[in-house]
Image: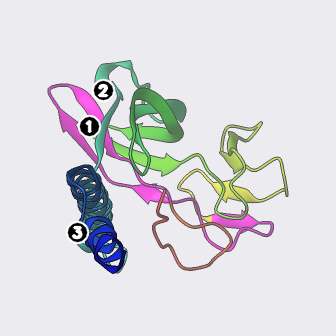
Amino acid sequence: MAESKEAGNTEQSAPQPADESRRGALKVLVTAGSIAYAGALAAVGASFATSTVGGETRERWLRAARLADLPEGEPRRVPMIGDARDAFTVTPAEQLGSVWLLRKGNDVKALSATCPHLGCAIDLAADKKGYSCPCHTSAFSIEGATQSGPSPRGMDLLATRITDGWVEVDFRKYRQGTAEKKESAS
């Protein structure tokens, strides 16, 4: 009987071929999952590493209006249409905000229509000689300088250029509630 017990123990301790294939499949799945996870982390890390540092961003020129369509000396609000970029998605042809354009000859000045105080929409004043924020009564000159109210700075001036008869604006958004004009992440 002792021989039969020894023979039985030997058979049970030897691995079965089916067990080996299951272990191999599990190892492959764990390895593949780990590689996929590491790849996702690497993509996010690379995006972070190549992002802008210190407020420096790439230019974002958007067509605003035809120069010929802008009346001389009269502010005109223009929606800024472009691709909205999120962490992993791009939505084409979204309204990103709006600007006030003021033409003087062939020069065009663009002011953000977002109030630097808390982000309300800035309107043209009733007398058409300046701008006003209806939320907290900030008032701005036609050039965008603060005249009254709680706004910590004047309206944000944006770069413009004329290309093939179109006014293009380097559209940016700035932090609200601060005297310092610093670009926001969005």
Q: Which quadrant holds residue 38?
A: bottom left
Using a 10 Å C-alpha cutoff, classify the residue at mark 1 as few (fewer than 14 neighbours), some (14 to 19) or many (20 or more). few
Q: Is residue 113 magenta?
A: no
**Foreground mark, 3 or 1?**
3
Q: CA distance from mark 3 to mark 1?
A: 37 Å
Residue holding disc 2: 67
Q: Which residues are magenta?
A: 146-173
Residue under the image location 57 percent in, 59 percent down: 155
Residue holding disc 3: 50
Marks 3/2 in contact by CB < 8 Å: the verdict is no
- Comes first in the chain, label 3 or label 2: 3
From what the image shows, is residue 33 above or below residue 181? above
Residue under the image location 51 percent in, 63 percent down: 174
Using a 10 Å C-alpha cutoff, classify the residue at mark 3 as few (fewer than 14 neighbours), some (14 to 19) or many (20 or more). few
Using a 10 Å C-alpha cutoff, classify the residue at mark 2 as few (fewer than 14 neighbours), some (14 to 19) or many (20 or more). many
- Comes first in the chain, label 2 or label 1: 2
In the picture, measured across the screen, residue 78 lies left or right of residue 153, that is left
**Foreground mark, 3 or 2?**
3
Q: Is residue 158 magenta?
A: yes
In the picture, measured across the screen, residue 178 lies left or right of residue 118, that is left
Q: Secondary structure at mark 1?
A: loop
Amino acid marked by disc 2: Leu
Residue 132 percent across, percent down from the top left: 74, 49
In the picture, measured across the screen, residue 116 lies left or right of residue 185, that is right
From what the image shows, is residue 7 above or below residue 170? below
Residue holding disc 1: 106
